[in-house]
Amino acid sequence: MRNPRVVVVMGVSGTGKTTIGPRLAAALGVPYAEGDDFHPPANIAKMSAGTPLTDDDRWPWLDAIGTWAHGRAGQGGVVSSSALKRSYRDRLRSEAPDLVFVHLAGDRRLIEDRMAHREGHFMPAALLDSQFAALQPLQPDEPGVTVEVSGGPEEITARALSALAGLTDPASA
């Protein structure tokens, strides 16, 4: 991508957003922001207790991510965000219209297994069902790519970079 864009690494919990995001940012030579860091404490407490967030809980979080992305316009960046629903991605694009999405997607059993073996994360595997229920995959009119999460981090990152390279940069069109 000649004109660096901000990339949102999205997907249900456990797909590897926090693992792939920094690797993707390093490969692109841009900063990375962890989407979970934008959550207010009340959201983290709610999820830690096993309670799914409501849309009203998510709007301020999405707005904060959108503000960060807007500030990186033309410079590029990578940020993680579940961005499960089209309305959430539309909200992010309302702040930063040139966002591009990398949807990390995979088999539910693989993702559940990864969640069961990770340490130090507030999101319990019990909320995975609510995440899959809310997931609305990228639509053809949304700028982005879907990347399979089978394999190791290097393989997934390479897949994402290759898919992103295939996207048309609006500045060069």
Image: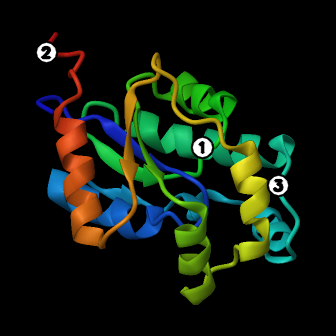
Which amino acid does the dot numbered 3 rest on? Leu
Report which residue position mark 2 lands on. 172
Image quarter (top left, top right, bottom left or bottom right) of the C terminus = top left
Report which residue position mark 3 lands on. 53
Which amino acid does the dot numbered 1 rest on? Ala
Label 3 close to label 2 by CB (< 8 Å): no
Crowding around mark 1 (Cα neighbors within 10 Å: few <14, some 14 to 19, many 20+) is many
Q: Earlier in the sequence, mark 1 or mark 2?
A: 1
Label 1 close to label 2 by CB (< 8 Å): no
Q: Earlier in the sequence, mark 3 or mark 1?
A: 3
Report which residue position mark 1 lands on. 83
Q: Residue at x 68, y 28 (%)?
A: 87
Which amino acid does the dot numbered 2 rest on? Ser
Hey, which residue is sitting farthest top in the picture? Answer: 173
Viewer-nearest of discs 1 and 2: 1
Dividing the picture into quarters, in which one does residue 16 lie?
bottom left
Measure how far apart labels 3 and 2 are at the Cα level: 39 Å
